[in-house]
Image: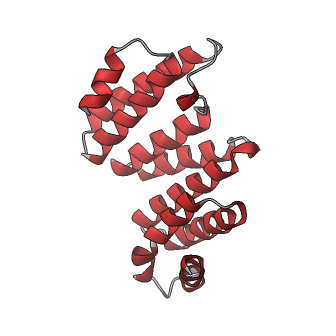
Amino acid sequence: MAVLDRALRRPVHRAARSVLYLRKARAHAALGEERACTRLLGAAEKDFEAAIGTGTAPAWCAWMSRSDLAVDTGRCLLDLGHTRQAHALIQDGTEVLPVAREKTHAVFLAYEAEGYLQGGDIDQAAHAAHTALAMAQRIGAPRCTALISGMAPAFKKHKTAPGVAQLLDEIHAAAL
């Protein structure tokens, strides 16, 4: 987090600052530090809103959108155990993602699957993972395929749940 702290002390575009705050919030969420995470999510949203209409963001964060903000916030909330609100944010962010960002859509669906899997909603997890994997294979998104493949061990614990056996077969076929 020291690298993020140094970067945030420098003058940067508000969109870039928003991305940096989100990354730091994700780190705090992973550590279970809810107060710090929540504070940083608020800062990320504030800077994102302030960046709208202020000119071109640096290329490394020009992709930042309301969708990204919603999904990353949702992933933080998942780590902190606030699953209902997290799923709502991830779904909302995924639904408003521009069509041109199909790879990101596949990754967001993988995040959604991961959240459902962690929450024990295996049917929803399998459905989201299947959709993400199919999309990833169709458009050639190896990052998304890897995310779904990484969930295979957790899905194997639920082989009898609807859709899981088929998903595991698809994951296996994708690895070949």
| Residue drawn at x 36%, y 28% as measured from the top left | 40
Q: Quadrant of the C terminus?
A: bottom right
Residue 164 in which image quadrant: bottom right
Q: Quadrant of the N terminus?
A: top left
Question: Which coloring applies here?
Answer: secondary structure
- Left or right of 19, for residue 80: left
| Residue drawn at x 59%, y 64% as measured from the top left | 128
Q: Nearer the viewer, residue 42 or 16?
A: 16
Q: Is residue 169 above or below residue 91?
A: below
Q: Position of residue 18 (x, y in %)?
A: 46, 25
Q: Is residue 81 visible?
A: no
Q: Position of residue 105 (x, y in %)?
A: 64, 51
| Residue drawn at x 25%, y 45% as measured from the top left | 32
Q: Position of residue 9 (x, y in %)?
A: 32, 15
- Left or right of 12, for residue 166: right
| Residue drawn at x 49%, y 62% as measured from the top left | 147
Q: Is residue 13 above or below residue 128?
A: above
Q: Is residue 67 visible?
A: yes
Task: Count the marks.
Answer: 0
Q: Position of residue 119 (x, y in %)?
A: 41, 63
Residue 7 in which image quadrant: top left
- Left or right of 61, for residue 10: left
Q: Is residue 51 above or below residue 19?
A: above
